[in-house]
Image (spheres, rainbow, N blue to C red):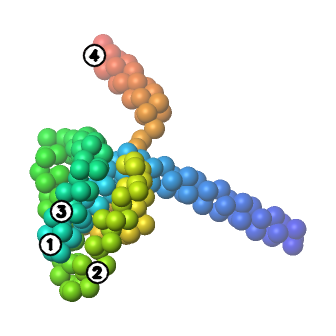
């Protein structure tokens, strides 16, 4: 009997290891998704804008935009695609709401921090200078724990499996309608 208990315990350990491995793999896919990266870059840009306005650092913000303007624009396009795919006709309103909430959350954090806010955030402009890519900016934003209005977990769906499922569902629906129309 003790053999079966050991076997059961070992099975449980293996199963939980597999589940944790799958979750870690899924989370890694989410963190590396293009939409996740776009949200991080948008959050960083907003944080820098709030810092520039609060700390009279418009020249530093302009330097950031000069250096990373093309990356920021590409990420804004990616964010727009995400909202269009997710919200359809109400995409623009949803994106505008997100941008407004983002600025509000970050501004309120600045107000709560008081005079120390500028001391904490001004160094970001210098820390960003050696970075080169959207991934660099996204990882920086995650490391700095840039505030977002909600917890955002965005994952790109696997393209091939979802297409094959859609084709299969479509075929089944066509067969079903043919059967019902013969009656």
Between disc 4 and disc 3, the foreground one is 3
Q: Is residue 102 shown left or right of residue 22?
A: left
Q: Which mark is residue 80?
A: none
Disc 2: which residue: 119
Residue 45, visible in the rendered structure: yes
Where is mark 4, residue-wise? 181
Whichever of labels 1 and 2 marks the residue nearer the N terminus, that label is 1
Residue 56 is labelled as 1
Residue 179: x and y in percent read 35, 17
Residue at 45%, 38% in the rendered image: 158
Where does residue 114 sit, x and y in percent of width and height? 20, 86
Q: In the rendered image, which quarter contains the N terminus?
A: bottom right
Q: Residue at x 48, y 33 (%)?
A: 161
In whole angstroms, how far apart are the C-alphas of marks 3 and 1? 8 Å
Say if 135 sits above or below 11 in the image.
Answer: above
Task: Determine which residue is flagged by label 3.
Answer: 59
């Amino acid at each position: 009997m003790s053999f079966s208990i050991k076997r059961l315990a070992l099975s449980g350990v293996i199963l939980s290891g597999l589940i944790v491995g799958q979750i870690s793999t899924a989370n890694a896919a989410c963190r590396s998704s293009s939409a996740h990266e776009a949200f991080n870059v948008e959050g960083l840009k907003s944080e820098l804008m709030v810092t520039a306005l609060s700390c009279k650092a418009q020249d530093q913000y302009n330097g950031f935009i000069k250096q990373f303007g093309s990356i920021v624009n590409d990420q804004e396009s990616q964010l727009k695609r995400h909202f269009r795919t997710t919200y359809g006709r109400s995409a623009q309103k949803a994106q505008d709401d997100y941008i407004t909430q983002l600025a509000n959350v970050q501004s309120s954090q600045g107000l709560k921090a008081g005079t120390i806010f500028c001391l904490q955030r001004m160094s970001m402009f210098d820390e960003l200078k050696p970075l080169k890519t959207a991934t660099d900016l996204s990882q920086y934003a995650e490391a700095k724990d840039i505030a977002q209005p909600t917890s955002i977990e965005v994952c790109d769906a696997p393209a091939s499996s979802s297409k094959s499922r859609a084709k299969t569902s479509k075929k089944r629906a066509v067969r079903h309608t043919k059967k019902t129309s013969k009656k």
